[in-house]
Image (cartoon, rainbow, N blue to C red):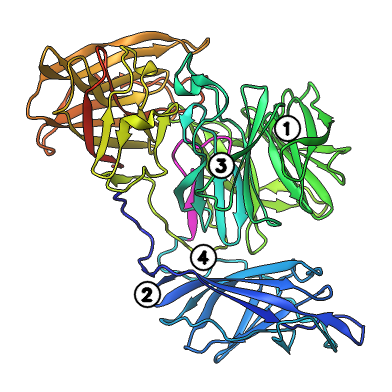
């Protein structure tokens, strides 16, 4: 896969980890307190003249009420910015002191911080001290220091960076990623979203600064949901599958969890040790945890779920069954419906974050996961940041390394879909979350989060399919027939279905459309097409159109076809399309192009063109008016297809699939 990266050039792909046993003193009045800890020091990335690092301290002794970790650099390195603590450096000697919120570390607990540094060489520190006591690698009695290390609040403004803007604009991702769940693990942020009938499902995005996001993977490698409809066998699964699922990380076993209800009657659990890969199905639970939010509280798993009637379930430790559940809140008629649950714990309170679709957000609070809960309104009919779009709602909350809180919602912006939208959260003196607005609306722009600026791989770009697997930017319409495609030397698509209905065709490969407008271009080798085959590039949704090739009676024509449609009742096909324009082509190679305007509102269009030399493009057919209704939920996508109408056996090879913005 060929992908242009805006990330600082990595001069070293580093994962240097040093685990050191450190004896440290706890802060206590006892004359002989047991002390000891283990330090894991990791180089997370490195670029010319700089590096990033993560440090975890495991407390093996008595509880700590404050800590200072010290070490010496041996190659002239300097700490330039640090989070989850404060730092002082004198020459080679570095001292990190706890932040206001992480000074207490229980026996067996751990605390982490991270930093960026300067230096061209990075040998790991040889030893560490905790509260002044040198590493021994064992738990030993020690005389505690008299005073608690001083606590300094974390910085409140981003560090100077000539490449970093002072503000960011919404939406932070102008692609269709709805029903999001967002978490932080170390210095990385992960965002999980709905995909309905697209496979692989439950995409995972990654960011290090909450503003720059990249494709990272999928939690559900294949829609393995005990129904042939997801394989287009005995039916179809449009607008079924994955929606409003839960995503979280469990520190006790270093495992990521995805949990989602399908078809209102069963829930699946998937797990992985890596957020971006290695996911597998762990369990099916024969109960629907509708619009679920997952919380690990002292390693006990809880799920908040429901529509109108909100419930909380405690799951078994392995998340394969339910221990107990009960209703905790019934939405009053004055509010209407609440759903889209996320569950958090802050201090002594449990919070359930709920949406009033599609124009409000509410929060419940209790000192017990099973209630009773009190309720507050967070927003209602708040103007959003996208011109012509809806009210930001649903989504989830996340706390940064420096203790800031942010709310990642989504904004309805059809025909493109639902776009992730970010805003800061503060907390009232009595412990309620408060959304920060700009002139009475969700800000189109805010000061960026107090995090190091971290550009990542762009979500657009060109792919020549030279890797051994497809990249995470791709999803198939339903599960693919894996025997009918290959990558490595271009994407070869053999026909997998005999049909005159694109909605019935397997192995249609999709990419999201970048807003507010973008263009997809594919280079197609059609020399191996068979009579009756249809191959091309579609604007794919419940009202669709395409530009592509029709081969009939030995003659190949480029065609613009529209009028493909589905019924909103059951999503059955109501129109297979008709050709609006066409022209004969030869030579075995063609470039197909679709340019789409997905700004929210009615009357938005897509235009189609083709080229036989990759340079000069000819428009074909009328502009296609996009459907901006919400009922299909998923927004328009670029869809690459190849199917037969007579017999299997034909194939095309795609040597380029590019998405670009003006």
Q: Earlier in the sequence, mark 3 or mark 1?
A: 3
Pointers 4 and 2 in contact (CB under 8 A)?
no
Position of residue 61 relative to residue 198, above or below, is below
- Placement of the C terminus among the 4 image quadrants: top left
Q: Residue at x 80, y 80 (%)?
A: 35
Question: In front: mark 3 or mark 2?
Answer: 3
Q: Secondary structure at mark 1?
A: strand
| Residue 74 placement (x, y as % from top left) | 51, 89
Q: Nearer the viewer, residue 39 or 634?
A: 39
Magenta span: 166-180
Q: Earlier in the sequence, mark 2 or mark 1?
A: 2
Question: Farthest residue toward the bottom?
Answer: 91
User: Which residue is label 3 attached to?
Assistant: 280
* Left or right: where 610 falls relative to 239: left
Q: For residue 305, which numbered disc appears in the image? A: 1
| Residue 227 placement (x, y as % from top left) | 55, 21
Question: In front: mark 4 or mark 2?
Answer: 2
* Left or right: where 258 falls relative to 336: left
User: Which residue is label 2 attached to?
Assistant: 48
Q: Earlier in the sequence, mark 4 or mark 3?
A: 3
| Residue 2 placement (x, y as % from top left) | 29, 50
Q: Nearer the viewer, residue 181 or 23?
A: 23
Residue 320 in which image quadrant:
top right
Number of numbered markers: 4
């Amino acid at each position: 896969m060929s992908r242009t990266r805006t990330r600082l050039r990595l001069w070293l792909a580093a994962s240097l980890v040093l685990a050191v046993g450190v004896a440290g003193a706890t802060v206590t009045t006892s004359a002989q307190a047991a002390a000891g800890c283990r330090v894991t020091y990791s180089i997370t990335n490195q670029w010319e003249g700089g590096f990033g690092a993560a440090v975890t301290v495991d407390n093996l002794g008595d509880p700590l009420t404050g800590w200072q970790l010290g070490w010496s650099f041996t190659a002239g390195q300097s700490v330039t910015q640090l989070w989850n603590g404060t730092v002082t450096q004198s020459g080679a000697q570095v001292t990190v002191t706890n932040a206001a919120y992480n000074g207490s570390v229980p026996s067996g607990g751990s605390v982490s911080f991270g930093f960026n540094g300067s230096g061209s060489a990075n040998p790991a520190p040889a030893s560490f001290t905790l509260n002044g006591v040198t590493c021994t690698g064992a738990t030993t009695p020690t005389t505690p220091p008299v005073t608690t290390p001083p606590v300094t609040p974390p910085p409140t403004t981003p560090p100077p960076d000539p490449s970093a803007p002072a503000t960011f604009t919404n939406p932070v991702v102008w692609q269709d990623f709805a029903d999001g769940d967002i978490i932080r693990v170390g210095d990385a942020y992960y965002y999980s979203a709905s995909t309905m009938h697209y496979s692989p499902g439950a995409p995972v995005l990654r960011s290090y600064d909450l503003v720059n996001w990249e494709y990272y993977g999928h939690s559900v490698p294949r829609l393995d949901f005990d129904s042939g409809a997801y394989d287009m066998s005995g039916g179809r699964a449009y607008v079924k599958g994955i929606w409003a699922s839960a995503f979280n990380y469990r520190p006790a076993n270093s495992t990521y969890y995805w949990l989602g209800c399908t078809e209102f009657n069963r829930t699946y659990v998937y797990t992985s040790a890596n957020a971006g890969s290695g996911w597998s199905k762990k369990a099916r639970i024969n109960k629907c945890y509708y619009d679920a939010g997952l919380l690990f509280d002292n390693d006990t798993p809880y799920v908040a779920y429901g529509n109108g009637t909100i419930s909380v379930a405690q799951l078994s430790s392995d998340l394969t069954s339910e221990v107990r559940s009960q209703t905790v809140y019934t939405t009053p008629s004055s509010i209407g419906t609440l759903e889209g649950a996320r569950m958090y714990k802050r201090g002594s309170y449990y919070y359930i974050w709920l949406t009033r679709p599609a124009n409000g957000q509410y929060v419940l609070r209790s000192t017990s996961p099973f209630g009773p809960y009190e309720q507050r309104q967070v927003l209602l009919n708040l103007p959003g940041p996208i011109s012509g779009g809806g009210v930001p709602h649903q989504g989830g909350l996340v706390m940064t390394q420096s203790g800031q809180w942010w709310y990642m919602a989504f904004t309805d912006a059809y025909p493109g879909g639902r776009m992730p939208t970010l805003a800061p959260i503060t907390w009232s003196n009595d412990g309620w979350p408060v959304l920060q607005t700009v002139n009475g609306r969700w800000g189109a722009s805010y000061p960026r989060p107090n995090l190091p600026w971290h550009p990542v791989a762009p979500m657009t770009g060109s792919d020549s399919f030279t890797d051994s697997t497809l990249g995470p930017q791709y999803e198939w319409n339903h599960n693919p027939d894996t025997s009918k495609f290959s990558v490595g030397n271009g994407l070869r698509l053999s026909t997998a279905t005999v049909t005159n209905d694109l909605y019935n065709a397997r192995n249609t490969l999709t990419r999201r459309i970048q807003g507010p407008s973008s263009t997809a271009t594919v280079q197609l080798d059609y020399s191996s097409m068979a009579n009756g085959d249809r191959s091309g590039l579609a604007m794919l949704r419940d009202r669709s159109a395409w530009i592509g090739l029709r081969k009939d009676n030995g003659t190949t024509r480029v065609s613009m076809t529209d009028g493909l449609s589905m019924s909103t009742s059951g999503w059955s096909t109501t129109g297979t399309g008709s050709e609006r324009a066409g022209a004969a082509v030869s030579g075995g190679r063609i470039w197909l192009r679709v340019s789409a305007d997905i700004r929210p509102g009615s009357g938005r269009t897509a235009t189609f063109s083709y080229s036989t030399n990759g340079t000069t493009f000819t428009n074909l057919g009328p502009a296609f008016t996009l459907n901006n209704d919400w009922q299909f939920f998923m927004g328009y996508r670029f869809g690459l297809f190849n199917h037969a109408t007579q017999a299997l056996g034909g194939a095309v090879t795609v040597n380029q699939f590019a998405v670009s913005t003006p």
